Amino acid sequence: MLNAEASPSEQEELNNLLSQDEALQQQYDLLVRIWKEKNDNVKDEDNVNASDTISRIISRAGIESDDAEMVIRRKRQRRRRNISLATFSLFSLAVAGWFWKNNSVSSAIIEKPVKEISITQNGSRTRSLLADGTTVWLNVGSKLFYENDFNGTTREVRLEGEAFFDVVKQSSRPFIVHTSGIDIRVLGTAFNVKSYPEDKNVETTLYRGLVQVVRHEDSLSKPIQLVPNHKLILPKQAAIETIKLSEDRRLSVKEPASPNITPIDSTKKESERIETAWVYNRIEFQGDSFEEVSKKLERWYNVTIVFTDERSKQLSVTGSFEKETVDQAFAALKVAFPINYKITNHEIFVESSK
């Protein structure tokens, strides 16, 4: 009826019934008013009041329909009763449904976003697609914290470990990575961040786009700009981490260290570059000490490496592994470098052979 879908005969019968029942006429008038207010986009508080009124009407419908039935039976107008009650029920259900839908939408809007966390154990790597379309490759032994909707003015994540980000560009909503006392702010770009808890430095390698890096202990200074095919190395500072992403800040009593920006070999394909070799299931090291290499090997193979002398820690190691097992990897290391080793379950004992 409210949408002018009733036939002339149905409208006439409804009018006759309403003229005989004052209470039903009042209810009908209320429904008409609510319907008009809905189309005029009434304020939320009016909707709540009207919704409560309709709930009372629907709860009374059963009682009042019994009274109407008695009147109609006495007047032997069964057909008119059936049409009117059906029409009234449709009115009530339609309006109640509209309020249920709108209240559901409102609830969805004010519902708080859910905190998410992606974790990779030692020996495993993952690839994830975030809500905004950004792709994240998470290296071994890493954690990524974020909210599941990205509906705010920024898209923020917190990283512990190493990840490669291919960020979808959204000019009005920058993408921010919080890690180890720094914020990395981007719009649309591809970059790698390495910041394991045991690492001495935070490394950010940019492949495409542009990033700005802000250190929490030096937030008033001009952000560090990083251009493609360059790597930024920042020493970690003493820090205290908070809970919320938007308040993820670390405090420091040290003077900010000078940033070290170095070019990477852009003549190589991305799959061949040492900084992101792990994305292509390869682990590489170039002139690193065996102690530094051991940390990578522990995460890569999910083992514990124990040095039984100091000399073996200082060996300079260059090489790469891709499909090798941990036994094959250490057999190759023994051939290339003066070491001996023993594997016991998940522990590897290493010592210098000279």
Image (cartoon, helix red, strand yellow):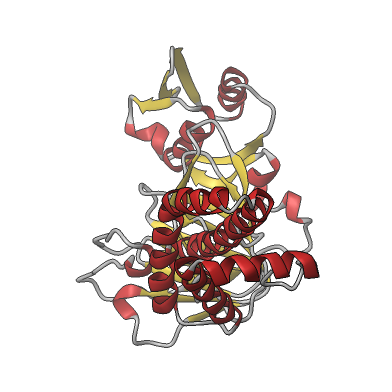
Residue 23 percent across, percent down from the top left = 44, 67
Instruction: Tell which residue pokes out farthest to the left in this image.
Output: 253
- State left or right for residue 59 relative to residue 97: left
Instruction: Tell which residue pokes out farthest to the top in this image.
Output: 344
Most foreground residue, 190 or 320: 190
- State left or right for residue 194 relative to residue 86: left
Which residue is at a point 58% across and 55% down the rendered structure image?
Answer: 89
Which residue is at a point 42% across and 50% down the rendered structure image?
Answer: 63
Most foreground residue, 99 or 237: 99
Q: Is residue 237 above or below residue 354?
A: below
Most foreground residue, 46 or 73: 73
Residue 14 percent across, percent down from the top left = 65, 66
Residue 127 percent across, percent down from the top left = 63, 44
Residue 348 percent across, percent down from the top left = 43, 20
- State left or right for residue 215 relative to residue 126: left
Q: State whether residue 169 appears in this view.
A: yes
